[in-house]
Amino acid sequence: SSELTQDPAVSVALGQTVRFTCQGDSLRSYYASWYQQKPGQAPVLVIYGENNRPSGIPDRFSGSSSGNTASLTIIGAQAEDEADYYCNSRDSSGDHWVFGGGTKLTVL
Amino acid sequence: QVQLVQSGAEVKKPGASVKVSCKASGYTFTSYSIHWVRQAPGQGLEWMGIINPSGGSTSYAQKFQGRFTMTRDTSTSTVYMEVSSLRSEDTALYYCARDSSGSSWSAFEIWGQGTMVTVSS
């Protein structure tokens, strides 16, 4: 399968923990990467590989993986974390890539 | 600093062609592949394809085979995405993104600012 499935929307109270999930067969072979996109802006890489954060990404963002599911967790969500979050991975062939449908995060 | 700078917004008529550029700077152009990603208005991200600037090899998502062509010019460190026979459904933001990959992981670590292509009669 070349699909990655994400929940369309999730909400979290300010300062609480939120987890995003991404499901797909290719995640049994390849790690997901995660992207944050705010309105009118280009996506930004927040997590890649086993659990790696690019420079400048706060340590409240973390990633994990189990079986066919990858997860992105924000511990202590801030107002500025309100955005769309996309997972991405190679597909099962390894030659193409695929994005999940994205999850819209609302911080209450 | 490492950056990808894309060409400006385009407005085209149905049936026309458009060529979007993505100029790399701050790193060795031929050392990293470049992805193209499309985002229709109000929609999610779609992977279109990848080009290796070193040899020019390309791979396209099935949906983007035929009317879409990725090329590169190593003399100017620029990659291009050309779309022919434009349709209204090609109206979207087009992003380029630099690839970093290992055997089991990948990342679109640097993104261009996006180029809006509008197809309208």
Image (cartoon, rainbow, N blue to C red):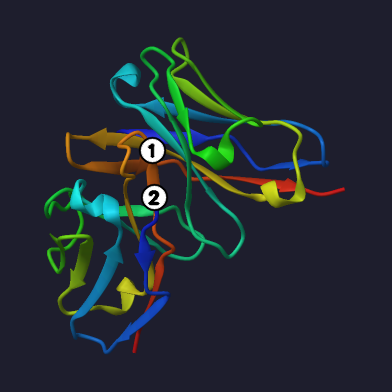
Badge 1 is on which residue?
A96
Q: In this view, does B55 lie above or below A95?
A: above
Residue A13 vs residue B25, the one in the foreground: A13
Residue B46 position within the rendered picture, expressed as x and y whole percent measured from the top left: 49, 50
Residue B69 position within the rendered picture, expressed as x and y whole percent measured from the top left: 59, 26
**Residues behind callouts 1 and 2 on a single chain:** yes
Dividing the picture into quarters, in which one does residue B40 lie? bottom right
Disc 2 residue type?
Answer: Ser
Q: Residue A2 carries which label?
A: 2
Disc 1 residue type?
Answer: His
A103 sits left or right of B12 in the view: left
Residue A108 vs residue B13, the one in the foreground: B13
Dividing the picture into quarters, in which one does residue A91 lie? top left
> Helix or strand or loop: what does disc 2 sit on?
loop
Residue occupying image coordinates x 20% and y 42%? B105
Nearer the observer: mark 1 or 2; the answer is: 2
Q: How many marks?
A: 2
Residue B53 position within the rendered picture, expressed as x and y whole percent measured from the top left: 40, 19
Q: How crowded is mark 1: few (under 14 residues within 10 Å), some or many (20 or more)?
A: some
Asked whether residue A10 is in view, the answer is yes
Residue placed farthest to the front in the image? A1
